[in-house]
Image (cartoon, rainbow, N blue to C red):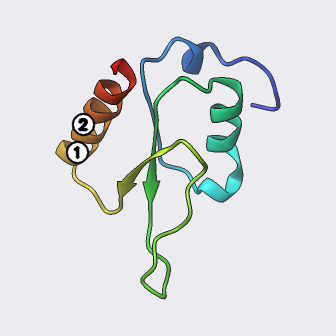
């Protein structure tokens, strides 16, 4: 994002982010669009502990079915409406 607006993200109701959170993309989205629900895949490390997520992101446990992804997106939307 490099600090630039993103029309696809700005026009979204919710974002499902499947890239490594350590890349900083999820953090950049949260910074630029703080009210936008952001669901982030949360993988487990070799130690079995879950990866850390950027603040304000909704975790999606990995691996997850398509149905699980839809449920996470719908839950994030419902929470944003409250």
Which residue does the image show at 56% across and 21% down from the upper left?
9
The mark closer to the camera, 1 or 2, is: 2
Name the residue tied to disc 2. 70
In the figure, residue 22 lies in which quadrant?
Answer: bottom right
Q: Considering the image in quadrants, where does the N terminus appear?
A: top right
Q: Secondary structure at mark 2?
A: helix
Q: Secondary structure at mark 1?
A: helix
Measuring from the top left, give residue 36's x and y in whole percent: 52, 24
Direction from residue 33 to residue 16 in the image, left or right? left
- 32 vs 27: above or below: above
Disc ID at residue 42: none
Direction from residue 33 to residue 38 in the image, left or right? left
Name the residue tied to disc 1. 66
Q: Is there a contact, CB below 8 Å, between mark 1 and mark 2?
A: yes
Q: Considering the image in quadrants, where does the C terminus appear?
A: top left
Measuring from the top left, give residue 37's x and y in whole percent: 46, 30
Q: Residue 49 or 23: which is nearer the viewer? A: 49
């Amino acid at each position: 994002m490099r600090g630039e607006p993103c029309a696809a993200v700005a026009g979204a109701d919710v974002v499902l982010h499947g890239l490594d959170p350590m890349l900083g993309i999820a953090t950049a989205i949260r910074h630029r669009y703080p009210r936008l629900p952001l669901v982030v895949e949360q993988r487990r490390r070799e130690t079995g502990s879950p990866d850390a997520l950027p603040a304000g992101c909704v975790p999606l446990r990995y691996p997850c079915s398509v149905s699980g992804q839809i449920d996470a997106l719908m839950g994030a939307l419902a929470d944003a409406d409250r």
